[in-house]
Amino acid sequence: MTITEKILAYHAGKNSVVPGDLIMAKLDLVLANDITAPLGIEEFRKAGAKKVFDKDKIALVADHFTPNKDIKSAEQVKMMRDFAREHQITHFYDVGQMGIEHALLPELGLVLPGDAVLGADSHTCTYGALGAFSTGSGSTDFAAAMITGKAWFKVPESIKFIFYGKLKKWVGGKDLILYTIGDIGVDGALYKAMEFTGETISNLSMDGRLTMCNMAIEAGGKSGIVPPDEITLQYVKQRAKRNFTIYSSDPDAEYSDIKEYDVSKIEPQVALPFLPENAKNISEIGNITIDQSVIGSCTNGRIEDLRIAAEILKGKKVHPYVRLIVIPGTQNVYLQAVREGLVEIFIEAGGVVSTPTCGPCLGGHMGILANGERCISTTNRNFRKRMGNDTSEVYLSGPAVAAASAVLGRIGSPEEIGK
């Protein structure tokens, strides 16, 4: 079996499963945010449920519109807050404690290798970087999971992605996943587990792995996963507050497809509007001016991302016609960035630094685009109207290109500003 099949078999109480099997799996964590939780809470009440299955295995994070941007968002968070109090939910994170959920929960050790996780947010697939099976759902399935602690799944087929070779300078996890989506398309892994392996992945940081698994959904994937290794263990051992199980794929495991990539040939990537699959090498982009640069989100708001951006922005000034918005993924990342002097670099360069929030990624707040404006962003989606006006455009990149572009006033590489 593959690592995904092994995890699902265990949580379904079976010795083995094969792709296509319908199973009912026990869950180690159920999560939602200030947009999806209120819908789930309504369904929970409609079902007549009186209590959650386990107050320690539910996470509610106010991250999309917080601090509340308007009355409606304030009411949504209040509904979630009241529910958390009523059911004494252990892991409720409000302003001051919260971060972007998919950056926060791994940081807190709430997701561990071998877990089965269901979240009412499509980017729940992020946690596969820890060696867990983790996938998104709608709010109704989230409500059922809060009541029963279980969810049904069709066991997905797996695609194995093997990355080998040495990364070029300024190429990271975001570039690898954009390149992959550019190769297979936004439905290239439809309802499949994307298993990332190879020597390049073995040497990739946990932040880079989280970025890659985060965007499995952008290829249509049911989940993304990286088999645990020493880098995984170093990350989770200092955070874990319970036991966990390491799984790995058998040598004779069957895959629906196997893809191999020589990363030494991959340049920094930029995905053009209006699909993540429109990925191109930075050298192919041409002269595209921008109005805004966003560095952050559940994809690239971790400390490694901010360090890369600061390295490029140090001693530079943001172009006078560009707005640079930097959004740390969690309070701890924000604090670390302050301690390391990164925030000072961003502000001296002419950027602004926000409290942790999903903010502009979904067109929420903290950087909405006007008619015809262009943004280079380290977020994960560039659909039409995603970040604002329907004539605006979002270009996806890693933090290195986003930072360099803020200085250039157009999409460009760090080398163009001497980095």
Image (cartoon, rainbow, N blue to C red):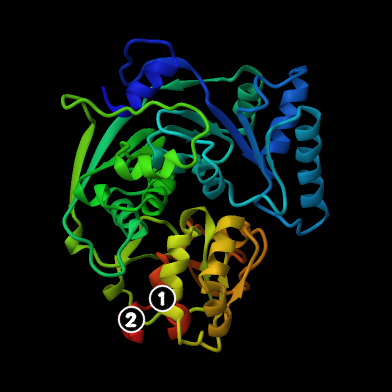
Disc 1 residue type (three-letter): Glu
Residue 153: x and y, percent?
A: 46, 22
Residue at figure coordinates x 18%, y 60% from the top left: 166
Left/right of residue 135 with respect to residue 157 in the rendered view: right
Residue 50: x and y, percent?
A: 78, 18
Name the one closer to the observer, 357 or 370: 357
> The N terminus is located in which quarter?
top left
Viewer can see residue 311 = yes
Q: Kindly indicate whether the residue at mark 2 contacts the one at mark 1 (C-beta within 8 angstroms).
A: yes
Left/right of residue 314 with respect to residue 392 in the rendered view: left
Say what secondary structure mark 1 lies in: helix
Instruction: Answer few, some or many: residues within 10 Å of disc 1's Cα (few below 14, many 20 plus, some between 14 and 19).
Output: some
Residue 66 placement: quadrant? bottom right
Question: Which residue has dot 1 on it?
Answer: 311
* Disc on the earlier residue, 1 or 2: 1
Q: Outermost residue toward the front?
A: 238
Instruction: Answer few, some or many: residues within 10 Å of disc 2's Cα (few below 14, many 20 plus, some between 14 and 19).
Output: few
Residue 319: x and y, percent?
A: 51, 87
Say what secondary structure mark 2 lies in: loop
Left/right of residue 266 with respect to residue 237 in the rendered view: left
> The C terminus is located in which quarter?
bottom left
Name the one closer to the observer, 302 or 44: 302
Residue at figure coordinates x 32%, y 27% from the top left: 247
Badge number at residue 57? none
Q: How many marks?
A: 2
Question: Which residue has dot 2 on it?
Answer: 419
